Amino acid sequence: MSSIMSLAKAYEKYFKIGAAVSCRNVDGYYGLLEKHFNSITPENDMKYSETEPQEGRFTFENADKVFDAAERLGIKVRAHAPVWHNQTSPWVYKDGEKDASPELIYERIDAHSKALCERYGGNVYAWDVVNEAARDDDKEGGDPVYRDSEYFRLCGPGFIEAAFRSMDKYSPDAQLFYNDYGECGPAKRERIVSLIRRLKDRGCRVDGFGMQQHYFTEPDYDELKRSIETYAALGLRLHITELDISLMAAVNRSDRRLKPGDPGFDEYIREVMDPTPEKLAKINGIYVRLFEVYRSYSDVIDCVTTWGVADDYTWLDFFGSDGSRPKIKQYPLLFDERHQPKPCVEELIRAAQ
Ligand code: GLA
């Protein structure tokens, strides 16, 4: 392992440095985690379908592995996304053949939260209680604020409130976060603000907002600052929860994430198949500028988590791959495929001195 100093130590006076891990990779990353990170988030292992695939049948083996690693590391966990429209088993929404009533869904959320907290509560310092419930900007029709999910179709915004109330009851000492993406776009930002305001107006404890910060285009640093200020003005603590910078951000000339079939996608694929030093340097440069912004708001930002540890495994390896295409490397993290710090890590450490 390289001899540079610890990133987490260098940032102690600003915020925690976290990473998403899974039961399958946490041991392989142990050395890097021990040296450079002081927070971990289970990438998938605490999601609803992973932990309760059938009603009342709890499967904690995978999450246990992440919590075991956290215990060995001597740190607490940033727990992630029990209530989300994805990775939730269909039974949650059903009552036999019929749709489940809102009350039944709230009871299920309550039982699920209770089970998670009984097992892990004392080792969790923050929960992403609800993930991604605000609607996206680019969809026609629907509710002006909320995502048209199965939860929303059956319960309206009540499921969000139910989730926060249950988590507050069972995890009174952990901080409770609402987490979302696209959080720096002005229209979505307004939706997220309305969603959180309503929760607070209805007496729910919301301690913080999780800014996911997945970058597929070059960041708009002014919008980032405006967003941090807007969310902080709601009286919230902020965590950067899922930071990564896709190679797309270095080559994508449009202002949105490109998906298979979008105009420009094929050109993009050609470009990322050729990850030149200039393109990789651009990702480094974006990290340096983003951290400069995060440091300047360290009075409200308590944690910066990257969505993965090193480039040998990231969810982006599979993103935009339609099966017939080769795996697309995105180089989105702070450590390379050989677990070595990228040049920006040294720059980030220097800038924190
Ligand atoms: C979202 C979720 C994460 C994860 C990523 C993709 O951002 O919040 O849990 O599933 O998508 O990996």
Image (cartoon, helix red, strand yellow):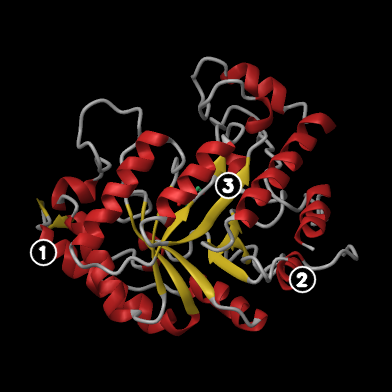
User: Dots 3 and 1: beta carbons under 8 Å?
Assistant: no
Q: Residues within 10 Å of mark 2 (few under 14, many from 20)?
A: some
Instruction: Provide residue 5's location: percent of width, then percent of height.
Output: 84, 67
Residue drawn at the location 67% of the way across and 34% of the way down:
247
Q: Is mark 3 within 8 Å of ligand 1?
A: yes
Spatial separation of the CA atoms under disc 2 and disc 1:
46 Å
Residue drawn at the location 35% of the way across and 79% of the way down:
171
First in sequence, mark 3 or 1: give its number.
1
First in sequence, mark 3 or 2: give its number.
2
Q: Residues within 10 Å of mark 1 (few under 14, many from 20)?
A: few
Quadrant showing the N terminus: bottom right
Residue 35's label in the rendered image is 2
User: Dots 3 and 2: beta carbons under 8 Å?
Assistant: no
Foreground residue among 28 and 212: 212
First in sequence, mark 2 or 1: give its number.
2
Q: Is residue 21 visible?
A: no
Spatial separation of the CA atoms under disc 3 and disc 1:
35 Å
Spatial separation of the CA atoms under disc 3 and disc 2:
23 Å
Q: Is residue 223 visible?
A: yes
What amino acid is labelled 2 in the image?
Lys
Q: Secondary structure at mark 2?
A: helix
Residue 103's label in the rendered image is 1
Instruction: Provide residue 143's location: percent of width, then percent of height.
Output: 20, 37
